[in-house]
């Protein structure tokens, strides 16, 4: 297991904290994203630069991500690896549940899931079709030129964005085989084919890009990621 902390121009004591854990590799971005904020002052970076830097320095066969303000159940990676091998997928996304301190250090009972997994699996064909459904033809018509078209103009045109469907489940913590990153990386906003409607969507763009490129992506409704939000995930039913 290799743990890499990428310091995305933070202003807290990240470096000092990481030094307490010799087994953790610390990296600091050499530059800041010049387009981190949009014209309204909203941060649209969404960690895309930090994730690419981490990818470049990782050595494992499989990679995944963890946002600094959230957490995961203790056996998230173990289960994601199990699912990747079980379904022979290079790209696995599981689900999220609301962050709660009492869940820190706990594990998900995969045996319970195996008994109740009705309606919990989204197939590679369904995800590939969703990638196609949400992608406008404008990206093919204006190949190589679309990064120079302002996002605000593309957003208003169905030529570029036919729908804003989310990537299923927790798109910020995919489990990805290393070979994928030879072909797919996280992209700046103007280059994203699947951004969010607010212009961020680095994770949405990355996951749909992988799904379109390799066509073996799967999503499993197991809530392994702990997201710091105010409401519980409405997609969770009959899961422990």
Image: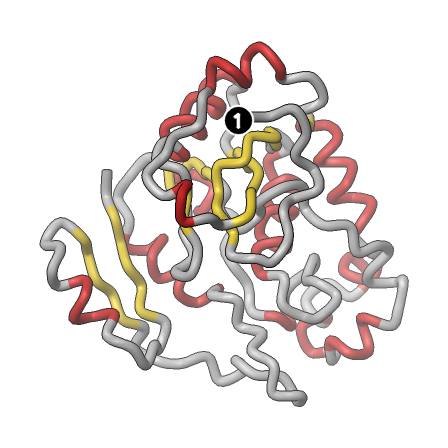
Q: Quadrant of residue 107?
A: top left
**Residue at coordinates 32% horizontally, 39% vertically from top-left?**
105
Q: Is residue 219 left or right of residue 178?
A: right
Q: Is residue 166 left or right of residue 36?
A: right
Q: Residues within 10 Å of mark 1 (few under 14, many from 20)?
A: some
| Image quarter (top left, top right, bottom left or bottom right) of the N terminus | top left
Q: Is residue 132 above or below residue 80?
A: below
| Image quarter (top left, top right, bottom left or bottom right) of the C terminus | top right
- Residue positioned most to the front: 102
- Residue positioned most to the right: 158
Residue 193 in the image, given as x and y percentages of width and height: 69, 59
Q: Is residue 205 above or below residue 30?
A: above
**Residue at coordinates 82% horizontally, 63% vertically from top-left?**
160
Q: Is residue 190 above or below residue 53?
A: below
**Residue at coordinates 67% horizontally, 88% vertically from top-left?**
40
The one of 123 and 140 positioned closer to us in this rendering? 123
Q: Is residue 18 above or below residue 119?
A: below
Q: Which residue in the protein does label 1 denote?
A: 89
Display colour scheme: secondary structure
Q: Is residue 38 left or right of residue 18?
A: right
Residue 206 in the image, given as x and y percentages of width and height: 58, 52
- Residue positioned most to the top: 115
Q: Dot 1 lies on which element?
A: loop
Residue 68 in the image, given as x and y percentages of width and height: 39, 60
**Residue at coordinates 36% horizontally, 28% vertically from top-left?**
78
Task: Give the mark count.
Answer: 1
Q: Quadrant of residue 119?
A: top right
Q: Is residue 115 left or right of residue 78?
A: right
């Amino acid at each position: 297991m290799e743990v890499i902390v990428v310091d995305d121009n933070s202003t807290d004591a990240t470096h000092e904290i990481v030094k307490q854990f010799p087994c953790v590799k610390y990296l600091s971005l050499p530059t800041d994203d010049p387009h981190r904020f949009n014209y309204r002052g909203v941060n649209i970076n969404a960690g895309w630069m930090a994730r690419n830097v981490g990818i470049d320095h990782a050595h494992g066969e499989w990679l995944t991500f963890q946002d600094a303000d959230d957490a995961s159940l203790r056996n998230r990676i173990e289960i994601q690896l199990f699912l990747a091998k079980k379904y022979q997928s290079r790209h696995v996304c599981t689900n999220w549940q609301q962050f709660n301190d009492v869940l820190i250090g706990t594990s998900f009972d995969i045996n319970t899931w195996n008994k109740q997994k009705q309606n919990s699996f989204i197939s590679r064909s369904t995800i590939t079709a969703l990638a196609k459904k949400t992608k406008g033809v404008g990206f093919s018509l204006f190949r190589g030129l679309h990064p120079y078209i302002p996002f605000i103009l593309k957003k208003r045109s169905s030529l570029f964005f036919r729908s804003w469907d989310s990537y299923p489940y927790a798109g910020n913590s995919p489990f990805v085989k290393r070979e994928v990153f030879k072909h797919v990386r996280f992209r700046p906003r103007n280059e994203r084919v699947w951004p969010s409607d607010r212009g961020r969507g680095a994770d949405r763009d990355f996951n749909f890009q992988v799904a379109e490129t390799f066509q073996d992506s799967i999503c499993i409704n197991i809530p392994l990621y702990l997201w710091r939000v105010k409401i519980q995930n409405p997609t969770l039913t009959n899961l422990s």
